[in-house]
């Protein structure tokens, strides 16, 4: 049991014993003792004054005496301005370190057959373009949130919904048919998703030109946008797709497969995966069936033009269209269909949607609709809403070809990692294969950490060069510290020094050593906090703080050069345990740490 929990329970006992009052352990307020005051844990005593009927100082003295007598782990206490500062025994901190050192899964809770099943949806790409910078943030957040959910003792299913139908898909298809000249990924050497994306951009170029020409002939901008030959042809292609026209379906399947093959390469490079992929071409008809069921059961209503609506005004929302007058579905209908398919496939206890904050209202509505349709987890669904990501030179537009492709960004990151490493002379003596792998590890570590250390709710500016700095709050700084610790451990082993995880109790601890053990002891609570808040940033900033403290310790304390064998062993175990926590924490962010750098 963590010292905070022990103290809280003993405070409950003390208040009952001294003042005859029952309180809850959660109502006890504890803080880390200020740096300029001796002690480890500070108890805020002011809430207890109404029970003690004494001054803050007298109350703190009484509680301090009780705790010192009742808890072996408390060596001493002091009272300053009504705050009770407790000094925790060295043996407790050594026991914490021993426990962490001997548990490979320290900080993690294992799932069992009774654990809740949480489904996390992320990525949600369109099949008319490659994954871009915004998708990178989405994928990294989704994957990391899944790992954190799993680390908190839940069963996890990771899913993706692919938007593989609609007018935007037909735009790329029409452009390829008109101007593609039989180009394929095989005969051009262009990655499939990039090739399809090029035709999406080409469509927009022709479409704009047609609009301009029609305006010159006297049409208004709105009329020209509706009557341009390209958009008319794309709409006709969509109608043919919905009618299952064999030629259109064949083209759709061929071009979609190009995109899926491209996506697979990007997902693998990025280090994310899925347990199940759903496709909107499968889900939209299921959604339509659910909406018609809701209409039949009186959950929804139909207007004179035959469109189907949900009246959510009683729920503090507005009226929402679910089927258009021509019977076609909207995005909400598709999400209902996807939900039903997932509910059939898995016994979901909680559903987490990782989708940008521009969709906040959509998910408020979806939650209420799913609840009305009888999905058990409808009301409890969680929309993990996150902010947008931009580059220093501004916003991106995919139809204009100004989007930063995920593949291009990762390649640029690897190049920046190579240049930075060469300038710093970090990777001398490596083979070419080792260099390539390490550059990739550093680059992706930099990219992922920079994306995940920011509060997910905030918009962020991504700067590739800044993210690869080997100093400061960056992935490479953490990776380098991990590699430094592993180097120390390897040197110890090559010198015949074996780590003994049964620590000698007679050694004394410096303030920094005790601070490091305190930081290690927080790891389980940090994982829980990150899970409760759905925030990888909590993990990222904890790891950075731990690594920063370790580097100060490394600067001030000798490890292998320490002559006292028991102290040297303690410092090696401390270092190794910190490395293990760093590696575990970084894995929750989807980041690998290199054994040497």
Image: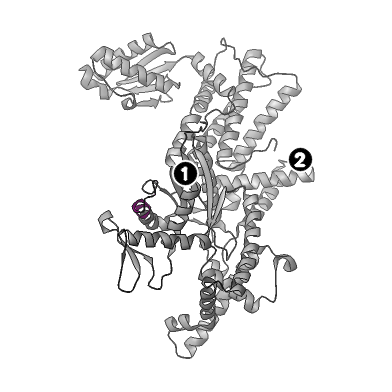
Residue 173 pos. (x, y %): 60, 72
- Numbered badge on residue 459: none
Q: Are marks 1 and 2 in contact (CB under 8 Å)?
A: no
Asked if 501 appears above or below 387 in the picture, the reply is above
- According to the picture, the residue beneath numbered tag 2 turns out to be 428
- In magenta segment, residue 230: no
Please tell me in which quadrant of the rendered image residue 94 appears.
top right
Q: Nearer the viewer, residue 67 or 126?
A: 126
Name the residue at 79% across, 42% down: 431
Q: In screen coordinates, is 307 left or right of 408?
A: left
- In magenta segment, residue 373: yes
Alpha-carbon neighbours of circle 1 within 10 Å: few (<14), some, or many (≥20)?
some
Please tell me in which quadrant of the rendered image residue 205 appears.
bottom right
Magenta range is: 367-376
Name the residue at 52% across, 27% down: 520
Q: Nearer the viewer, residue 205 or 318?
A: 318
Name the residue at 26% across, 25% down: 47
Q: In screen coordinates, is 577 left or right of 339?
A: right
Q: Is residue 113 visible?
A: yes
Q: In screen coordinates, is 225 left or right of 203?
A: left
Residue 88 pos. (x, y %): 44, 16
Asked if 130 appears above or below 277 in the picture, the reply is below
Q: Nearer the viewer, residue 470 or 330?
A: 330
Quarter of the image for the N terminus: give it: top left
- Label 1 sits on a secondary structure element that is loop
Residue 468 pos. (x, y %): 61, 47
- Label 2 sits on a secondary structure element that is loop
Quarter of the image for the C terminus: give it: top right
- Numbered badge on residue 347: 1
């Amino acid at each position: 049991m963590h010292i905070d929990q022990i103290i809280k329970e003993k405070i409950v006992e003390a208040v009952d014993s001294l003042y005859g009052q029952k309180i809850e352990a959660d109502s006890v307020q504890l803080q880390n003792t200020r740096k300029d005051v001796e002690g480890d844990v500070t108890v805020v005593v002011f809430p207890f004054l109404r029970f003690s009927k004494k001054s803050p100082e007298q109350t703190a003295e009484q509680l301090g005496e009780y705790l010192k007598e009742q808890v072996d782990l408390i060596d001493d206490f002091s009272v300053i301005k009504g705050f009770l500062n407790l000094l925790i025994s060295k043996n407790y901190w050594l026991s914490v370190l021993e426990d962490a050192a001997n548990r490979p899964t320290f900080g993690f809770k294992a799932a069992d057959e009774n654990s809740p099943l949480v489904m996390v949806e992320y990525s949600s790409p369109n099949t008319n373009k490659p994954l871009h910078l915004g998708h990178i943030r989405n994928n990294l957040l989704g994957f990391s949130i899944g790992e954190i959910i799993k680390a908190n003792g839940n069963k996890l299913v990771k899913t993706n919904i692919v938007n593989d139908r609609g007018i935007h898909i037909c735009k790329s298809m029409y452009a390829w048919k008109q101007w593609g000249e039989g180009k394929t990924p095989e005969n051009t050497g262009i990655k499939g998703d990039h090739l399809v994306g090029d035709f999406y951009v080409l469509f927009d170029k022709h479409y704009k030109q047609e609009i301009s020409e029609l305006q010159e002939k006297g049409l208004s901008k709105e009329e020209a946008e509706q009557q341009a030959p390209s958009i008319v042809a794309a709409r006709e292609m969509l109608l043919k797709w919905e009618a299952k026209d064999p030629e259109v379906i064949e083209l759709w399947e061929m071009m979609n497969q190009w995109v899926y093959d491209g996506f697979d390469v990007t997902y693998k490079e990025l280090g994310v995966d899925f347990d199940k992929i759903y496709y909107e071409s499968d889900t939209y008809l299921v959604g339509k069936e659910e909406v018609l069921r809701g209409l039949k059961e009186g959950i929804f209503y139909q207007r004179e033009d035959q469109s189907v609506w949900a009246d959510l005004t009683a729920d503090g929302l507005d009226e929402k269209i679910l089927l258009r007058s021509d019977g076609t579905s909207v995005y909400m209908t598709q999400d209902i269909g996807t939900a039903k398919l997932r509910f059939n496939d898995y016994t979901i206890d909680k559903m987490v949607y990782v989708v940008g904050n521009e969709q906040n209202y959509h998910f408020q509505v979806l939650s209420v609709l799913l609840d009305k349709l009888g999905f058990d987890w409808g009301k409890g669904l969680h929309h993990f809403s996150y902010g947008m990501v931009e580059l220093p030179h501004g916003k991106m537009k995919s139809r204009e070809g100004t989007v930063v492709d995920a593949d291009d960004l990762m390649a640029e990151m690897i190049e920046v990692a190579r240049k930075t490493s060469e300038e710093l002379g970090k990777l001398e003596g490596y083979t070419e294969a080792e260099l390539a792998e390490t550059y990739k590890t550093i680059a992706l570590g930099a990219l992922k950490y920079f994306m995940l250390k920011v509060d997910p709710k905030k918009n962020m500016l991504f700067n590739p060069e800044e993210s690869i700095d080997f100093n400061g709050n960056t992935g490479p700084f953490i990776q380098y510290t991990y590699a430094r610790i592993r180097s120390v451990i390897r040197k110890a082993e090559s010198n015949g020094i074996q780590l003994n995880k049964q620590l000698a109790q007679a050694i004394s601890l410096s303030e920094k050593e005790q601070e490091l053990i305190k930081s290690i002891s927080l790891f389980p609570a940090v994982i829980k906090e990150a899970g409760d808040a759905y925030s990888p940033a909590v993990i990222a900033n904890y790891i950075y703080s731990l690594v920063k403290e370790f580097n100060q310790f490394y600067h001030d304390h000798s490890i292998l050069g320490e002559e006292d064998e028991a102290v040297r062993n303690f410092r090696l175990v401390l270092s190794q345990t910190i490395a293990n926590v760093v590696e575990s924490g970084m894995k929750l962010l989807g980041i690998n740490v290199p054994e040497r750098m």
